[in-house]
Amino acid sequence: MRSVVVACLIVLGAAASAAAQYAQPAAPTPKPAGAILIASFNIQVFGESKMAKAQVVDVLARVVRQFDIVAVQEVRAKSDEIVPAFVRAINADGSRYHYVIGPRQGRTVSKEQYTFIYDTTRIEVDPSSVGVVPDPQNKLHRPPMHARFRTKITPAEMAFTFWLVDIHTDPDEVPQELDALTGVFQAMQAARPDEDDVILLGDLNAGPPQFKSFQRIPGVAWAVSGVTTNTRRTKTYDNLVFTRPATSEYLGGWGVLDLQSTFGLSLDQALEVSDHNPVWGAFYPAEVRGAGMPPMAGAAAPVRR
């Protein structure tokens, strides 16, 4: 198994304490000044029963605190209090996260919601931008949720702004849905003339070898390649997709936060948290035009375990 954690120590070092399996953090996790960290995490049937397990909620909260924004898939609950309660758990250490959430979706009785959870000290959302991508031809089992964000750690006139498009594909319809998502990506690129940065992220139920339809997008790229992203370490399902010409803010730093090795969990304990590991990419917090991209300060070479 080759799990990847590509990060400077300031980003993920605070979480990697295998000895303190369920220890509460003493203070909000520090984040790098020169990057924002955008993650995707399928929390697998995230609902009442998972929120009732204190040790699971603790690990989930510690995961979220590592990142500036986490696009979550598979919120599956009848109660509307699951995500608010989870955000309160995240903020129990003094952090200041908030969320936006989409409607329940799905073609069966089992409905799911997408949510973005973000650090309000470093990120803000445009409330008018939150919505679901139209799918009039019913090509997607759960049409993606979109929202536009802006960094707060640089002056407003310089801030990196970007669309996030959160998706969980149907495992039985992967080729068709990836083809439809190519159209979704291009539609989001054209959604407003003042925004060229689109990051589609989530559980694609597919890895780069299956991304042939995305090749129709000029300059397309993705963060995660060559490693597994599920908890059992057998499949590459989760990713962040963007275009390099437009999103030149991408710093080249990315990783898979392995639940077992990061938190000192057994496989069974990790599977209680989720059957997916979080994946992430690092982006420069200010808009970048043309060449001259600053390197990711303190970035380490990929660590393979």
Image: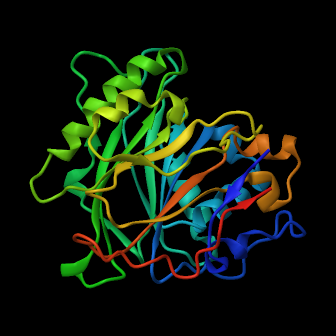
Residue at image location 58% in from the left, 61% down from the top = 64
- The answer to whether 277 is drawn above or below residue 38 in the figure is above
Q: Residue furthest left?
A: 193
Residue at image location 54% in from the left, 60% down from the top = 87
- The answer to whether 193 is drawn above or below residue 203 in the figure is below
Rendered-image quadrant of the N terminus: top right
Q: Residue furthest front?
A: 291
Q: Is residue 47 visible?
A: no
Residue at image location 49% in from the left, 22% down from the top = 170
Quarter-of-image position of residue 131: top left
Rendered-image quadrant of the C terminus: bottom right
Comparing 304 with 72, the one in front is 304
- In the image, residue 106 lies at what x, y percent? 43, 22
- In the image, residue 5 lies at what x, y percent? 67, 61
Q: Count of labels shown?
A: 0
Residue at image location 64% in from the left, 60% down from the top = 63
Q: Is residue 303 visible?
A: yes
Q: Is 88 left or right of 125, judged from the image as shown?
A: right
Q: Is 187 left or right of 100, judged from the image as shown?
A: left
Comparing 173 with 64, the one in front is 173
How is this picture coloured? rainbow
- In the image, residue 153 lies at what x, y percent? 36, 82
Q: Is 189 left or right of 118, judged from the image as shown?
A: left
Comparing 23 with 49, the one in front is 23
Q: Is 250 left or right of 9, judged from the image as shown?
A: left
- In the image, residue 269 lies at what x, y percent? 84, 46
